[in-house]
Image (tube, rainbow, N blue to C red):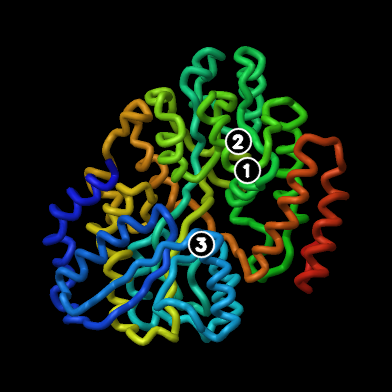
Amino acid sequence: MKKILLTTIASTLIATGFASMANAGEFSGKINVWAWTINVPPLQQSAKMFMKAHPQAHIKISTIGHDALLEKLSAGLVAHGKGLPDATLLPDDHFSSFVNIYPSSFVNVGKMGMDQTAKLFPKYKVANITYKSHMYGFPLDGGPAVIFYRRSTFAKAGVNPRDIKTWDDFLKYGKIIKAKTGHYMCGGSDDDGLYRIMIGQYGKGYFDAKGNIDLKSPQSIHTLQFIQKMGKAGILHNRAAGWSPSMRDMATGTVSAIPEGVWLAGNIETAAPKTKGDWGVFPLPANGDGDVHASNLGGASFVMFKKSRNKALTYNFLKYYTTTTAPQLLAFKAGLFPTLTTVYKTKEFNAKMPFFKNQKVWKIAADTTKLIKKVNYTEDYYYANLEVRKLYSGMVFTDIDVVKRLTKTIDSLKARTGRKVNQY
């Protein structure tokens, strides 16, 4: 079905999609771009559209799994570019892990012209791929977070999602749902995604804007203790680790609310087709002490390598793909949440979604993008994520002292990275 949609949109938008390329000039030669799974079909279709307008251009899209791509990228950078393509897709939270460490291996695409496109994207997205005041990436998708909920479970418990304004409300009504239906509010303890969503509402992460370890901030401690409080209250499902168990919880109705990036919408449709009409979304709750009803979890962008022998073709294709409405509609129809704001004005993006009982899910998420605050990931994000996930999985369903355990986590991270630790 998605393939049919991609083909249909491509055939109707080729003319308008290239209106802005009239003065781009003819490009020739070959380039290779890496991407993973869901990104490949719209990227391939857009490459065909581009090559139709520029017959001398030959664009190859190589499909590589997410984790395998990061491993190959690491190996290629260590080997001074050996084995790397002309460009690759890169998760935003790993951007600093590569660009900050190997800046001489990447092209400053901001100086090539991408800096002038910054106004087309949400500020947080541009900030995520900026290095030394210039864009080093082509913004693609994002993950503005919302709460997905099961309508039937909420109705059975007599809970109106509009009444959930704060995280305290989330806990309060989660207890009611558990008592009246036996269903958990949400679940999982192996991944710290909920923690990252909640501290992201403050514009905080593992590190502050200067790169100091910021895990001991009052907001971080409050968030961890609050999640532990939800675990003790019995509203979180202590399920097995991994993606499959979470999808199973979602399909069976074991959990009734899922705080997640809006990209989960496509996963719900695929994993639980029989639940059509029983899902809805509402904005993130807030604490009301400096945070907002918005956060981001997920998203990726393209980066170019200096070893590319055809920078003109690589740059112009990726600029076309990420800054033009037509190809980004292809990406949207394939399941990606676009960060190109011109897409937000299209009828396709603003259409009602039958699976979600005709809610305009994408618009609800898009309305939060202007509120999302920048988070500094730094080149040590990978190690910090490992340490915090260990902390997280060991505390949610236990009585451990969060502050004491957090101190051990911070000491370990400090020893590994040499970074300063913020004291409060």
Q: Quadrant of the N terminus?
A: top left
Mark 3–mark 2 Cα distance, whole angstroms, equals 24 Å
Q: Which residue occupies the foreground of this view, 309 or 283?
A: 309
Sequence-wise, which precedes: disc 3 or disc 2? Answer: 3
Q: Secondary structure at mark 2?
A: helix
Residue 2: image tag: none
- Residue 80 makes an appearance in the image: yes
3 vs 1, front mark: 1
Task: Give the vertical position of 177 relative to 392 (above or below).
Answer: above
Which amino acid does the dot numbered 1 rest on?
Gly
Which amino acid does the dot numbered 3 rest on?
Pro
Which amino acid does the dot numbered 2 rest on?
Pro
Task: Give the vertical position of 11 relative to 294 (above or below).
Answer: below
Q: Quadrant of the C terminus?
A: bottom right
Labels 2 & 1 near each other (Cβ < 8 A)? yes
Report crowding for label 3: few under 14, some 14 to 19, many 20 or more residues within 10 A (C-alpha).
some
Residue 245: image tag: 2
Q: Secondary structure at mark 3?
A: strand
Which residue sits at x=13%, y=52%? 12
Report crowding for label 1: few under 14, some 14 to 19, many 20 or more residues within 10 A (C-alpha).
few
**Mark 1 highlights which residue?**
242
Residue 359's quadrant in the figure? top left
**Mark 3 highlights which residue?**
91
